[in-house]
Amino acid sequence: MINVLTEGLTRIHDEILALRQERGDLIGDLHQEATDRKSAVSQMLATFSKDLSETVRRNRKNRTDFMANLRETVSNLQQEVRLELGEAQQALATLRMSGPKGLEPSKARRNQETRTTLQGKENRPVGRNEAVEGRDHEPGGRKDEATPKKSKLSALRRNRK
């Protein structure tokens, strides 16, 4: 019986030692995997940082190139507009000088034609505050057309009663 007891205790002792060894190996493997993972994450972050700095550098270069091109384009367009404006002003001055009457602004001509039409046969221009036949002194210068309709309605209503 002592022999069986001794063999049982020896077997349990060996199993405990084997389990301790397995636990030590497992902990060692976990430490090695953690170290490898830290190294891989560090490399990945370094790659991200490198790619980001490259992207920032490339975008900055693209923006500066674009702005330089934009400034040049705007400058060229401004110069073209100035030249065309100068040419248009010269042409306008030439037209004004070419005829005895000169070039009348179209708005002034339209206003004069309207005033002449409103005056009838008179040749004098009508001032702003002067009354013209067919115009009342209401805003817009038109007769109120709602008044005759109202009087017709009131006449009809009176006839019904």
Image (spheres, helix red, strand yellow):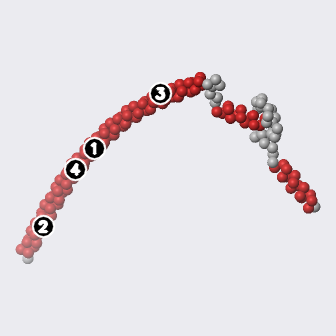
In the picture as drawn, the residue positioned furthest to the bottom comes out as: 1
Residue pictured at 25% horizontal, 48% vertical: 44
Taking 104 as reference, is 156 above or below it? Answer: below
In primary-sequence order, the first of circles 4 and 3 is 4
**Residue 49 as seen in the image, left or right of residue 103:** left
Foreground label between 2 and 4: 4
Quarter assignment of residue 98: top right
Residue pictured at 41% horizontal, 33% vertical: 73
Count every numbered label the image shows and give the total. 4
Q: Give the Cα separation between the discs numbered 3 and 1.
A: 48 Å
> Residue 40 bears which disc, if any?
4
Taking 79 as reference, is 12 above or below it? Answer: below
Foreground label between 2 and 3: 3
Q: Is residue 89 visible?
A: no
The residue carrying mark 1 is: 51
In primary-sequence order, the first of circles 4 and 1 is 4
- The x and y percentages for residue 12 are 12, 68
Foreground label between 4 and 1: 1
Q: Give the Cα separation between the discs numbered 1 and 2.
A: 53 Å
- The x and y percentages for residue 69 are 37, 34
Foreground label between 3 and 1: 3
- The x and y percentages for residue 145 are 81, 48
> Residue 83 bears which disc, if any?
3
Residue pictured at 65% horizontal, 25% vertical: 101
Q: Give the Cα separation between the discs numbered 4 and 1.
A: 16 Å
* Crowd tier of the residue under label 1, counting other residues whose Cα lies within 10 Å: few below 14, some 14–19, many 20 or above: few
* Crowd tier of the residue under label 4, counting other residues whose Cα lies within 10 Å: few below 14, some 14–19, many 20 or above: few
Q: Give the Cα separation between the discs numbered 2 and 3.
A: 100 Å
Marks 2,4: beta carbons within 8 A: no
In primary-sequence order, the first of circles 2 and 3 is 2
Amino acid type shown at disc 3: Leu
